[in-house]
């Protein structure tokens, strides 16, 4: 195992490649003139718990210049085309392109983290900095043995976590607007389906009323006691005519009942989908807000711990500035996890909206086919030409043209989310690497800790900090998934027992209600127990002198 000491970087990074431009398909979708159906006058609103952002609502409610809706907006004063499916797709594609541009905004050929992680570049930068300032060079040479300035070492991981937070905030803002657009689209489809359901229910009720009225009329005896055989036969035939017409209306009503049940299932599915999207979006956004607040609190706690140590105060291991850096890395990982949850939410929302829109179009085709067949077959007196209606239903079921740009927007958002996920993972890895090169570390290395309850030696990574604290990680080096030490000790209250040449013990006195704690460590590969004992003695003396 390679020993890691302060200022000794263990990895290098190549300069980041220049980011690609927005894909041509997205640019073409944005530049296209999407038509607007001006016959839809109703305003579409998202559910009250997830409102559209004002800026996005203004974009998608404003008709394109030169369109019939734009020309009529001045007369009516409304100018609302949000009910058009094309306007939704246009807004989704624009927002997805904005999210993609946010990913690549500010991309540089060589970043600060690339320089900091590359030992050759770091040495060259430090030599250039000290070229005109001999005093600073001498002070830095006596204060640190690494390739980075102490301030740069301390800020490296914090800068990586801060950059992750900035990108996550931009992505979350765009993701919330996309979620609001999808919620509004789904809500509009739900209300359109509810209107269709209401019409079908009204038609079914009308057919049932026709059937009841005509059946009742057929029961009336029209022949009189004085009528002859011919007149009685005519009266019986006339009484049977309403019954036959009523039976035809009953057949139409049966077809309408079947169609109504299908639309009811679609409406119920859309209602639950709207509720699920709203609740899932709120849950994901609250998790992101909480993670960012936790990251800001970790930064603040780290600064406070740094001020306490600079004043020479002595505290618990929780006040160690290096442990504060580890908490910043852990909080950054929580922010990245919240961003992943938001991206997964958008992926599910895009897929759900496309699925339900296709299902709604298929239901519309089925309803139109049922009505046309029922009225043509049962009511021969129907004179209106329904061929155009049937053709329109087939075209709608074949695939809504609005779903094409909507799918393009989903692809752009997924591509941008994947790029952000890669960059966030790199930032977390850089922060975890910088954690082991922090200026707060006096000594670190692979050790083994005695686990008395199990009677065995467990591998660990030991870290001694300038604040007089000893931390250890179980199993090995810290990772972005586990940047917080498994245990910590404040050396100011400990007693050191040098033991033998291979091991040493630290005895921590009991608290008010606890028991004394004894920890035994053994040097790992490439480590010298004697050097560790000397470093611990110096740290104990410095901690008790404060």
Image (spheres, helix red, strand yellow):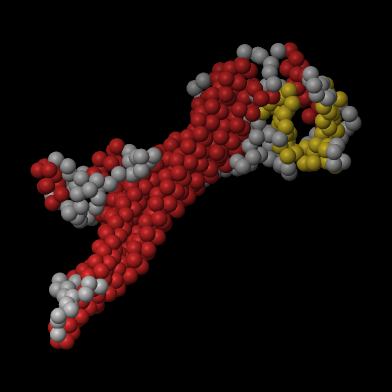
Residue 123 sits above or below residue 63 on the image:
above
Q: Is residue 448 left or right of residue 141?
A: right
Q: Nearer the viewer, residue 298 or 227?
A: 227
Q: Position of residue 518 (x, y in %)?
A: 84, 28
Label tally: 0
Residue 259 sits above or below residue 195 on the image:
below
Q: Position of residue 288 (x, y in %)?
A: 48, 38
Quarter where residue 13 is shown:
top right
Q: Position of residue 148 (x, y in %)?
A: 57, 30
Residue 334 sits above or below residue 403 on the image:
above
Which corner quadrant holds the C terminus? top right
Q: Nearer the viewer, residue 320 or 93?
A: 93
Residue located 78% across and 37% down the image = 447
Q: Position of residue 37 (x, y in %)?
A: 19, 55
Whether residue 228 is visible, yes or no, is yes
Residue 486 sits above or below residue 546 on the image:
below
Q: Nearer the viewer, residue 415 or 346?
A: 346
Residue located 12% across and 43% down the image = 76
Q: Residue lying furthest right in this view?
A: 500
Q: Residue lying furthest left in this view?
A: 75
Which corner quadrant holds the N terminus? top right
Q: Nearer the viewer, residue 321 or 52?
A: 52
Residue located 34% across and 53% down the image = 190
Q: Is residue 370 left or right of residue 166?
A: left
Quarter where residue 329 is shown:
top right
Residue located 85% across and 41% down the image = 454
Q: Residue lying furthest bottom in this view?
A: 229
């Amino acid at each position: 195992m390679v020993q890691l000491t302060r200022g000794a970087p263990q990895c290098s990074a190549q300069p980041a490649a220049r980011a690609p431009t927005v894909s041509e398909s997205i640019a073409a979708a944005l530049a296209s003139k999407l038509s607007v159906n001006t016959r839809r006058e109703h305003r579409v609103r998202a559910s009250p718990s997830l409102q559209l952002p004002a800026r996005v609502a203004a974009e998608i409610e404003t008709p394109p210049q030169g369109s019939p809706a734009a020309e009529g907006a001045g007369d009516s004063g409304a100018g609302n085309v949000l009910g058009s499916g094309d306007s939704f797709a246009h807004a989704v594609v624009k927002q997805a392109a904005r999210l993609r541009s946010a990913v690549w905004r500010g991309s540089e050929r060589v970043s600060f983290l690339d320089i900091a992680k590359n030992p050759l570049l770091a040495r060259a930068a430090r030599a250039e900095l000290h070229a005109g300032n001999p005093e600073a060079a001498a002070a830095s040479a006596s204060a640190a043995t690494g390739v980075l300035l102490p301030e740069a070492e301390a800020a490296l991981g914090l800068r990586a976590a801060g950059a992750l937070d900035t990108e996550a905030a931009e992505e979350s803002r765009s993701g919330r607007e996309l979620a609001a657009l999808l919620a509004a689209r789904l809500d509009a489809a739900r209300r359109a389906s509810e209107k269709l359901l209401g019409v079908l229910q009204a038609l079914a009720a009308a057919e049932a009323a026709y059937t009841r009225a005509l059946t009742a009329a057929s029961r009336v005896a029209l022949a009189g006691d004085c009528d002859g055989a011919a007149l009685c036969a005519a009266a019986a035939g006339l009484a049977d005519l309403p019954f036959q017409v009523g039976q035809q209306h009953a057949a139409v009503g049966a077809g309408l009942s079947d169609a109504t049940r299908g639309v009811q299932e679609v409406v119920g599915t859309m209602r639950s989908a709207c509720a699920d999207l709203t609740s899932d979006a709120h849950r994901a956004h609250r998790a992101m807000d909480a993670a960012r607040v936790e990251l800001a609190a970790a930064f603040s706690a780290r600064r406070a711990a740094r001020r306490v140590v600079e004043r020479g105060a002595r505290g618990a291991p929780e006040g160690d500035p290096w442990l504060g850096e580890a908490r910043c890395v852990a909080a950054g990982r929580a922010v990245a996890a919240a961003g992943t949850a938001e991206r997964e939410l958008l992926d599910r929302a895009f897929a759900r909206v496309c699925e339900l829109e296709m299902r709604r179009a298929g239901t519309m085709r089925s309803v139109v086919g049922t009505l046309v067949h029922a009225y043509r077959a049962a009511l021969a007196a129907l004179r209106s030409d329904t061929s155009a209606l049937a053709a329109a239903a087939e075209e709608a079921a074949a695939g809504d043209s609005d779903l094409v740009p909507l799918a393009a927007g989903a692809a752009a958002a997924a591509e941008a989310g994947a790029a952000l996920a890669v960059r966030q993972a790199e930032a977390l890895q850089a922060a975890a690497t910088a954690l082991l090169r922090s200026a707060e570390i006096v000594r670190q290395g692979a050790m083994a800790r005695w686990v008395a309850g199990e009677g065995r030696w467990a591998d660990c990574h030991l870290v001694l900090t300038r604040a007089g604290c000893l931390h250890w990680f179980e199993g090995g080096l810290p990772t972005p998934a586990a940047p917080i030490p498994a245990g910590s000790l404040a050396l100011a209250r400990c007693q050191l027992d040098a033991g033998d040449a291979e091991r040493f013990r630290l005895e921590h006195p009991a608290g008010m209600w606890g028991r004394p704690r004894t920890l035994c460590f053994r040097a790992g590969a490439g480590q010298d127990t004697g050097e560790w004992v000397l470093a611990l003695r110096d740290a104990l003396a410095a901690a008790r002198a404060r």
